[in-house]
Amino acid sequence: MRKMLAAVSRVLSGVAQKPASRVLVASRNFANDATFEIKKCDLHRLEEGPPVTTVLTREDGLKYYRMMQTVRRMELKADQLYKQKIIRGFCHLCDGQEACCVGLEAGINPTDHLITAYRAHGFTFTRGLSVRAILAELTGRRGGCAKGKGGSMHMYAKNFYGGNGIVGAQVPLGAGIALACKYNGKDEICLTLYGDGAANQGQIFEAYNMAALWKLPCIFICENNRYGMGTSVERAAASTDYYKRGDFIPGLRVDGMDILCVREATRFAAAYCRSGKGPILMELQTYRYHGHSMSDPGVSYRTREEIQEVRSKSDPIMLLKDRMVNSNLASVEELKEIDVDVRKEIEDAAQFATADPEPPLEELGYHIYCSDPPFEVRGANQWIKFKSIS
Amino acid sequence: MTLRDPCPVCVPFERPLSLSLSPRQVSGLLRRRFHRTAPAALQVTVREAINQGMDEELERDEKVFLLGEEVAQYDGAYKVSRGLWKKYGDKRIIDTPISEMGFAGIAVGAAMAGLRPICEFMTFNFSMQAIDQVINSAAKTYYMSGGLQPVPIVFRGPNGASAGVAAQHSQCFAAWYGHCPGLKVVSPWSSEDAKGLIKSAIRDNNPVVVLENELMYGVPFELPPEAQSKDFLIPIGKAKIERQGTHVTIVSHSRPVSHCLEAATVLSKEGIECEVINMRTIRPMDIETIEASVMKTNHLVTVEGGWPQFGVGAEICARIMEGSAFNFLDAPVVRVTGADVPMPYAKVLEDNSIPQVKDIIFAIKKTLNI
């Protein structure tokens, strides 16, 4: 309604920056919501799973679309900046997996907690940081969310614990955050993510054991994109039923390309955890378009046909768009408007990330310790000293 | 076993006697008071001191909790956490399965989320299984996050050689952990050290590694009055001069401090006065105290239980060379360390694999050219 009035008033005031078709868009009547069927989840040690239908409101739909498109375009911009050598080092992109980060966020509260591994830019955004802060961190500038000290794999936000570079190490960390949730008694939960490659790490099974023993409110989430770097799941795991690998921990296997499926499964899992029953496991079946990282073209261990097939049949943004347009929750033009808006946002952020200066050399020694008085840090030789402040 | 001499300042102030007593009664009372030991000092073992320190901090801040193998119902593998589970229960004192990497990670995660865990390794040898969590998840995080994510955690447990436990259970990790920026590493020797340092470690908002010593757990020390206060803290990063001297500086940490003091006592009879410095903290190292001492004595011997190569003594040598004290040295710095072998089992071999008093005396005489 607000949008309609705004568009109409803009036209009337003569500042018609947008074409006339926008007015038509604004005056169309959309449905408020629509009900969709979603894929049934495979269950492990669960009598029942998430519902097989869900209601999507127009407002939520537009929000999810915008968020997924933002993640998509942000990752593609990072690809571009990397090829221009403005981003260096590690850069693991998640385009194709947008339904996971946006869908998970849709199923939890901002006061819940989330930790993941290195393919983290999408989650950094959905957990509340701006594209500006993320891209500037990738380009290693002072305006980056970690002041340029962390880079791609070490971005932190409120109730978001990164961004972790050591494969699998984030899983015990997540169980520990869940322990803190239980300790504090505020009904909060922790989403602890890892990939299909990490799923074979021993420390994950140690975390499963303790989380189940102590009934920690932890959702273990395996983002299965079929490849751990260049090793397909069949070549890495004796059992590729990742949702069952928690053994005594109940699990669900979820269509990770369908944001509504992810959302419903997350709501289900979150309710399970909050009820005090202990941990639960979710396997999200998803796919990454890019290779493992920017150093990997991604076609030596999989075929271009496979990538193309997923793109044309299961793209998460396309799936949501089709649903919304076909149920009159939004129009093609309206969604195109969002695309243009998002592109602008990303472009602005990229401009900032390219123009912002690097952190000053004086800050090289900062943030070694927390809450300590300033001290000196040794540089490359005994005469080079950096001041360290907390 | 070494008893510390009672601190001379601990003698209480003598109050004047009532004049209604007979002279004989007065002199009798005076005699007794003169021979009585300082009433406020207390004999406390290192184990008891750590226990007290943890107990006080658990009481003071409900975010503090202890986890590790056997810390709760077993009262601690070395009984260091005796009585704590009874007092604080399952929520605050947590027995873990044998999963070092897992529970160390859980402890770090809990610290990231705002709790203040004490993570016990049954010995630091087992911390090797979890060392990634200590270094990559705990030590580096505050820096990597640009100051957004502190990790207020304590890793504690016995470190270094014990008695007859052989190679896999006798390694000293002071050099390994001392190597890493973002960590604080302390190594208490006495009960006062143990109590003050564990309390400071728990209150510190950074990851602190507390390297205790199993053979010191049962050793009693006099705990001076100020160390009996619930707010008694020893600052991390400050060494202590345990014995003043003029001829040579001996720097050590943990159990070898006892051997250094013994060596000093022996040498004193020969007219050699050793200044014995107890490092207390490995990182950040208090090189200033060592330098000031060397500028006075002109000779330096380092003593540690760990292996020589890339060890604590090696670091002290490097820093002395780089600093103001170098020009005051009358001889090169000498290191006394554990033997450069995996710890053997047979007693004669084990005894000769750690620094003995005679080795320290020999090194001191060598550096003094006696």
Image (tube, rainbow, N blue to C red):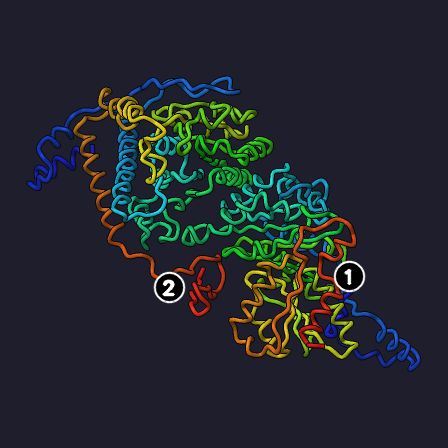
The residue carrying mark 2 is A362
Which labelled disc corresponds to residue A339? none
Calculate the distance from the C-alpha at mark 2 to the C-alpha at mark 1: 49 Å
Is B245 placed above or below B230 here?
A: below
Residue, x 84% and y 78% (percent of image)? B18
Residue, x 49% and y 45% (percent of image)? B113
The kind of residue tagged 1 is: Gln
- Which chain is mark 1 on? B
Residue, x 8% and y 39% (percent of image)? A16
Q: Quadrant of residue B332?
A: bottom right
Furthest-left residue in view?
Answer: A14
The residue carrying mark 1 is B43
Residue, x 61% and y 53% (percent of image)? B173
Which quarter of the image is occupied by the N terminus of chain A?
top left
* C-beta proximity under 8 Å, tags 2 and 1: no
Q: Secondary structure at mark 2?
A: helix
Camera-side residue of A57 and A159: A159
Q: Secondary structure at mark 1?
A: strand
Q: Position of residue B341 (x, y in %)?
A: 67, 53
Which quarter of the image is occupied by the C terminus of chain A?
bottom left
Q: Position of residue A151 (x, y in %)?
A: 37, 48
- Which chain is mark 2 on? A
Camera-side residue of B177 and B56: B177
Q: Position of residue B49 (x, y in %)?
A: 70, 56
Q: Is residue B55 at all visible to an observer of this figure?
A: no
